[in-house]
Amino acid sequence: MSKAKASESTSVEREHTRTGMSKAALKQDFLDNLFYIQGRFREVATPHDLYMAAAFTTRDRLLKRWVKSAQAFKTLHARTLCYLSAEFLLGPHLANNLVNLGIIETSQEAGQELDLDFEAILEEEEEPGLGNGGLGRLAACFMDSLSTCQIPAIGYGIRYEFGIFDQAIEDGWQVEKSDTWLRNGNPWEIPRPKIRFPVLYGGHTEQYRDQNGEPRMRWVPSWVIDGVAYDTPILGYGVGNVNLLRLWKAEASESFDFQAFNVGDYYGAVHAKIEAETISKVLYPNDEPEAGKELRLKQQHFFVSCSLQDMIRLHLNTVGPLDDFADKFAAQLNDTHPALAVAELMRLLMDDHGMTWDRSWEMTQRTFCYTNHTLLPEALETWSVTLFERLLPRHLEIIYEINRRFLDEIRMRFLGDEDRVRRMSLIAEDGERRIRMAHLAVVGSKAVNGVAKLHSELVKSTLFKDFNALWPEKFHNVTNGVTPRRFMVVSNPRLARLITECCGHDDWIRDLDRVRALESHAESSDLQAQWKAVKLAAKRDLTEWLKHVTGVQLDPAAMFDVQAKRIHEYKRQHLNALHIIRCYQELKQGLLKDPVPRAFIFGGKAAPAYFLAKLIIKLINAIAEVVNNDPEVNGFMRVVFMPDFNVKTGQRLYPAADLSEQISLAGKEASGTGNMKFSMNGALTIGTLDGANLEIREAVGKENFFLFGMTAEDVLEKQIEGYRPWDYYHGDHELKADIDLINSGLFSHGDTKLFRPLTDDLINHDPFMVLADYRAYIECQQRVSEAYRDQQHWVRMSILNVARMGYFSSDRAIREYAKNIWGIAPTPIDL
Ligand code: GFP
């Protein structure tokens, strides 16, 4: 063999061990990684060492695809989507990446041959909880689908050192523990210390003349920090495409002040470093009061500024002059958290790159698109002008100028309508002057969308009514979706196998519409039997695990009735609690002849400062304590609150649910995505006509969905005519009895005051109309129980639910965005 040939063949072999997909290559690489990266040998390796070695073995295989993708996108000048989001609730990477690489089974076998406990290795991974709930999880599903649909994309966000808090339950109360996900290292990220941008704060602005004598503005900040990139590869399913998730960490520009150190000021010497690092320290929990949010505004500016500077750098490095920036990039604003980007891009283009206002504005408006995720007034961000002035003086000037030009346009269009001008202004003038971030986002974007049909209609008819009158073509709907890779294949492998067997292929994993093939087998007693067995196995798994973490023993034969989502009054976990109390009373009174046993399962976090939400958690646990310890009823019902609902624990819940509770007050839940995850795993939904429930019901068939309650229109009417919960309380003796039982102290060891803030609120205010929907809900639950008795029918409905969920894949949502909003075509990566 010639020398050249020999070296070529070794390089092929080397490539193979490091990135090959065979069992032998995986085993070898795993042992190498354990040795060379962890410095361990099998006999002394801890479970965490084994996990790290498995993660690196997987990552090696991603990198090859990643580099290929980056090279191709660069040479092709591929139009790229930038997803700007303050939250990415990713969930554990390992199993997901193995599935997307197509080697999960080979890896399991390799693990077996090495005598490893594969499940235990997966369990070792601490999930990056860089999000609160729906919006952050949606961003993560979208990253998976962007890669799978081969759309070149970069996700931009913050690398919080502490993600969403871990929830413990102590004495029935939620207790928050800080999330230390980075403590043991993060094998999935690659630090890029050289990709670093300065971020400016404070100071003042000044005018000067450039070389051509043109007047220009510059910002003289009082404080500058650095943002440093940390990259995580995101692989698509069954494709070569790997996109980039780039998260920014805040660092001091100079880590150590030697001058201060030399004069003996040890603390002062590191102070700047500490202060800078605070910016990416912690994720804000939702629903926090406004006060003390200065840090949040700093965070928003921080990640937006780094991301835009990075986009400009990429553009200058590949395409060239900035004139066609908007042809290279589309940037999606995930809610208003990154809305500052509108002003920041203007600033960068004008102040740093010498562009005119008009040119910069045209480019800005062509670059951004904005997704609204909520109509709740408290979630619509506004920032005080005074805070802006202090922190971001240049942005304030730019926003004023955008507003001045925009309002002139309104005045010309709608002569003499000063009220409209006031309503549409970027600045709210009633009371303390505040900047309306949603208005900034709408004005600065070419497209605005809601996240489900109903929500998008409400966006147009309520929140942005005036804007819709001005620019009807700007408004779109893209109904949310979730990734079937994580929420079916990874979390419910038994069901995935059964579907593949029944369809005769696994193409449904990439094209979820193809699960419709199940429909024609829905009557097959053979499939029904297997379907039931799969569900029962998942319920057994969950039962065992819940026993381990909560001590509560469930009966897998009971109906698993699950509500898992953030705890919030609008989501109405307390309505569910009232139903449980109703069941309890009826069992105690012997009113139920042949009750259908149920396990009521809850999961979800309450914002630390949201008192009523925390009281709802306490109430659920208090009911659980009574019910589970009452031998007269506990053969028929059990209640359990699963602590620390997150992606990882959620993956245990979805496969095991029989009934999915989607019971928000109509008009309040923008879309919901949990509703989709449950349905895809064969749970039937009990729900209101809210968010995506409407579309789910249409898709799965009205007869396969348990609908109850007021419509969004009913709600509006009732509000207008004056809603009086008191009348419902007195008009329905069962409802009254349920609330009175809470107040009697039965669930609180005789303390009749404990739950008063909640019950008083329900009786006197009830902002989310729990009492108005109570009767309809109870009756609907009776229909659910009746339906559950006929197991054959139930299983058939369950099969049809899964078969008809194709539309709710996030791949569909991404294709819609790509086509209708971003104008980006797929760029397939050949390996
Ligand atoms: C929000 C909305 C949900 C919606 C998600 C994703 O969730 O209805 O499904 O965004 O669009 F409320 P949270 O971030 O508020 O949980």
Image (spheres, rainbow, N blue to C red):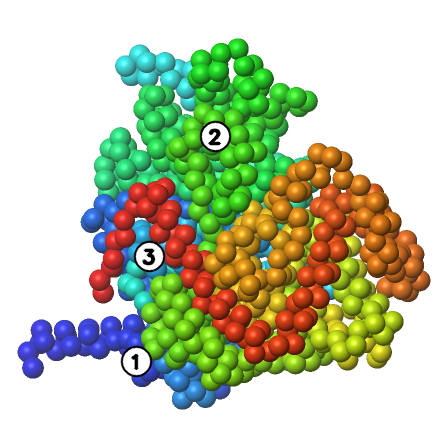
**Which residue matches tag 2?**
468
Compared across the picture, whether 821 is left or right of 290 comes to left
Q: Residue at x 32, y 52 (%)?
A: 151
Amino acid type, callout 3: Cys
Compared across the picture, whether 767 is left or right of 272 comes to right
Amino acid type, callout 1: Ser
**If you read the primary sequence from the N terminus, does the residue marked by circle 1 or circle 2 appear first?**
1
Q: Is residue 184 visible?
A: no
Q: Which secondary structure lies at badge 1?
A: loop
CA neighbours of label 1 inside 10 A, class few (<14), some (14 to 19), many (20+): some
Q: Residue at x 30, y 46 (%)?
A: 824
Residue 691 x, y percent position in the rendering: 56, 49
Measured Cα–Cα span from mark 1 to mark 3 = 26 Å
Figure disc tally: 3
Is the C-beta separation of discs 3 and 2 under 8 Å? no
Residue 56 x, y percent position in the rendering: 40, 70
Residue 497 x, y percent position in the rendering: 42, 78
Above or below, comparing residue 24 to residue 709 in the picture: below
**Which residue matches tag 1?**
22
Q: Residue at x 57, y 43 (%)?
A: 374
Measured Cα–Cα span from mark 3 to mark 2 = 31 Å
Foreground: 613 or 266? 613
Foreground: 270 or 411? 411
Above or below, comparing residue 294 to residue 654 in the picture: above
Compared across the picture, whether 498 is left or right of 17 comes to right
Q: Can you tell which quarter of the image residue 33 is in?
A: bottom left
Q: Mark 1: is the Cβ under 8 angstroms from ligand 1?
A: no
Q: Is residue 556 visible?
A: yes
Question: Which mark lies nearer to you, 1 or 3?
Answer: 3
CA neighbours of label 3 inside 10 A, class few (<14), some (14 to 19), many (20+): many
**Which residue matches tag 3?**
149
